[in-house]
Amino acid sequence: MSTEKNIVAIAYDFDGTLAPGNMQEHDFIPDLNMGKAAFWQEANDEAQKHDMDEVLAYMYLMLKKAKEKNIPIKEENFIEYGHAITFFQGVETYFERINRYAEEKNLKVEHYIISSGLREFVSGTSIAKYFTNIFASGFMYDENGVAQWPALAVNYTNKTQFLFRINKGIHNSYDNTLINKIMPEEEKVVPFSNIIYIGDGETDVPAMKMVKLQGGTTIAVYNPDILKARPGRMTPREQCLDLIAHRRADYIAPANYTEGSELDTVIKKVIDKIASEHELAKIKQQILNGK
């Protein structure tokens, strides 16, 4: 394995980070003839009633409500729901632009999703092709392709394990042997110093805290179209400022991915920093080798 750590991994939350709202709200919940508030309230009620993980609760409710409404729940149907997801400004052109920018710095960017949303929905989006891996909640399916049971539930605390999977180059969600195995730093595929985590709120706090602790970079983004808060709540921007105040996020920016935007500039500056550190490491190695 090469010891040149020239891979930059950018890990994104999905809902509220790349796309406004929750992915189920675009087409799936409307197909149930439910309002989004009613769906999430019922999911929260199920979680409380059964002392249940909130992600498992919403996944259970999706299957239950779909069966009641005779809505197909095959994998292909869930993937099709992803087609309707719309993104924040600039997202659909951002990935190729940031890849080219990194290549000019002799770096390779790998993009990852770490989300409590559904991997099937993400797989159906126009940007799915850009991700090295989609670590998100998902269903298991029977021989006819019909969803039967949650295969994976990604909640705000277990998001951190997927950062270690990226760090060690583990491209699945089931292998717990390798992830817990002690691995020399030089064998890890992506050092944490080369990891950028981008999220939008409280559900990203453990992941942000861990990335910062390990020497990576964290960026909190907010919906620029939401300027007012609900009673007793902070605005999205205020929530991001709070993440900085509590040393969870290094930077904040509106979720605008267009070229030259605040977020685009921050990401590029972080890539510049990683590129400089990479070059300095090579110079140091040359000195140690007597060249």
Image (tube, rainbow, N blue to C red):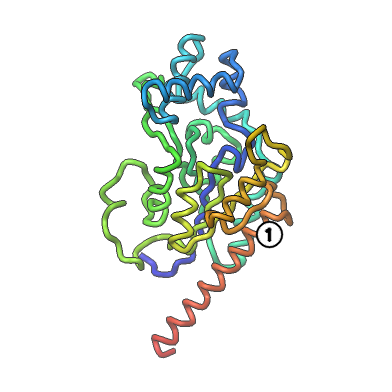
Residue at the location (58% across, 63% down)?
271
Could you tell me which secondary element the residue under label 1 belongs to?
A: helix
Residue at the location (58% across, 55% down)?
245
Q: Which of 215 and 23 is in front in this view?
A: 215
Q: What residue type is labelled 1?
A: Thr
Q: Which of 163 and 218 is in front in this view?
A: 218
Outermost residue, front side: 232
Q: Which of 13 and 155 is in front in this view?
A: 155
- Which quarter of the image is occupied by the N terminus? bottom left
Q: Mark 1 points at which residue?
A: 265
Q: Residue 171: x and y, percent?
A: 39, 47
Establish if 127 lies above or below 81.
Answer: below
- Which quarter of the image is occupied by the C terminus? bottom left
Mark 1: few/some/many CA within 10 Å (<14, 14-19, 20+)? some
Outermost residue, bottom side: 290
Task: Name the side, left or right, on which 243 lies relative to 254.
Answer: left
Q: Residue 289: x and y, percent?
A: 39, 86
Residue at the location (40% across, 60% down)?
189
Task: Name the side, left or right, on which 182 lies relative to 29.
Answer: left
Q: Residue 281: x and y, percent?
A: 47, 76
Residue at the location (44% across, 55% down)?
210
Establish if 243 lies above or below 120.
Answer: below
Q: Residue 59: x and y, percent?
A: 44, 25
